[in-house]
Image (spheres, helix red, strand yellow):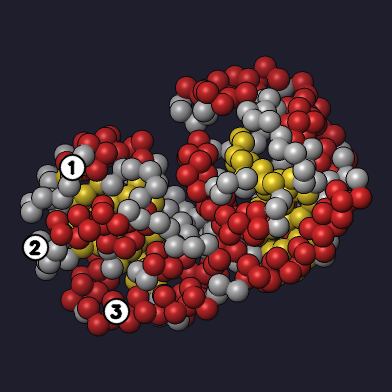
Amino acid sequence: MIFSLYRGLTQLGGPLISLYLDRRKQRGKEDEARFGERLGHPGQPRPPGRLVWIHAASVGESLSMLPLVERLRQRRLNVLLTTGTVTSARMMAERLPRGAVHQFVPVDRLAYVRGFLDHWRPDLALWAESEFWPNLLAETRHRRVPLVLIQGRISPRSFANWKKVPGFIRRLLSCFTLCLAQTEGDAQRLRALGGHDVRCLGNLKYAVPALPADDAALDGLVRVVAGRPLWLAASTHPGEEAIVARLHGQVAAAFPDLLTIIVPRHPNRGPELAAELAATGLKVALRSAGEVPGPDTQLYLADTMGELGLFYRLAPIVFMGKSLTVGGGQNPFEPARIGAAVLYGPLMDNFPDMAARMAELGAALMVRDGRHLAETLTRLLAEPAKVAAMRAAAKTWTESEAGVLDAVERVLGPILDAVETRHAGA
């Protein structure tokens, strides 16, 4: 009933969908040059041979798929990776290996979905996390393409919402022949909602290699900030930058030459943020303008793409954004993988098990609010031995979790072998 209603609305709602997409284009949330991909028009030819299609919603999901993409390429399988955001497309252009291509996922309207599938003809579909597009899933299954849920994630809030439409979510999950959950909690929720063959092998985010960094750029920054106490607020969201600016003054009372580095989650906010932060009376330098921290710089706003790995290496203490105001949290594994001491707020809904495990092992600390963050930073900056212990714990933990990729590949082995055999037979 709900599925039929959804399909009907997406069929009849073409003008409204077009209006919605036009507004997204005006706000910079769609790529004008590649907009046809969102309408099911391919941007590249299909490579000959076997093709595995991976769908990952945005940056975090697509990054977690990169180790698996590498393994698939080692099997000489072509890989198509789809995402829905401009930022993730730019990131994948830099990070995907040869033989893997990126496309924007088509909007979930039947005509667009069919155009996409007619062109790409995937032999296997791997669906990351929890973005369940009904038409895309149903049409893929209708074409007898095997579907596997990778990194399956159902938050407690989503679980409560899905339980209100049990038949609908059961139908969507029935498209997957295998569901690999991120955590045991996710596995339990997937089973309760009707998922088939649900297993928990671990989190593929643990298999992601350390974010890269330009060695020359890092050496230059190390020289510029030498001797200064510093910390990083990473992937911040609206409201968090103002909190960081306020607490800078509190911490600087004990450490007058403190340097606070902010990497906003959306770099396009940089110039506007710089003006807002400078209006508070703080001395701000903007990386996108070619500025580097001077002796009197208090806030360094690093509003550039693809440089988080650089700043994770520069700062011994990293606070993860989206955990004080918006909620959900950003991936704490990335700074821990490089060996940073991690702080996070109370709103880590997207990484509850990971954050709790890190805190349990002494690799991270949870802060209640901005005031608590200021107190914690002041204490840690005064205790370098404590920071060193947290950094060592983070490094040890991330290295111990690296085996999850092998486990996932073993489980996917028979499915991948079937794809190869089917092509050999053909």
Residue type at tag 2: Pro
Tag 1 residue: 291
Give the alpha-carbon distance from disc 1 to disc 3, as whole Å. Answer: 30 Å
Residue 159: which numbered mark, if any?
none
Q: Image quarter for residue 365?
A: bottom left
Tag 2 residue: 256
Q: Residue at x 20, y 72 (%)?
A: 381
| Tags 2 and 3 touching, CB below 8 Å | no
Tag 3 residue: 388
Q: Secondary structure at mark 1?
A: loop
**Of 168 and 291, the residue lying toward us:** 291
Tag nearer the camera, 2 or 1:
1
Q: Is residue 83 left or right of residue 171?
A: left
Q: Secondary structure at mark 2?
A: loop
| Tags 1 and 3 touching, CB below 8 Å | no
Regarding residue 366, the answer to whether it shows in the image is: no
Q: Residue at x 52, y 44 (%)?
A: 92
Whichever of callouts 2 and 1 sits on the residue coming sooner in the sequence is 2
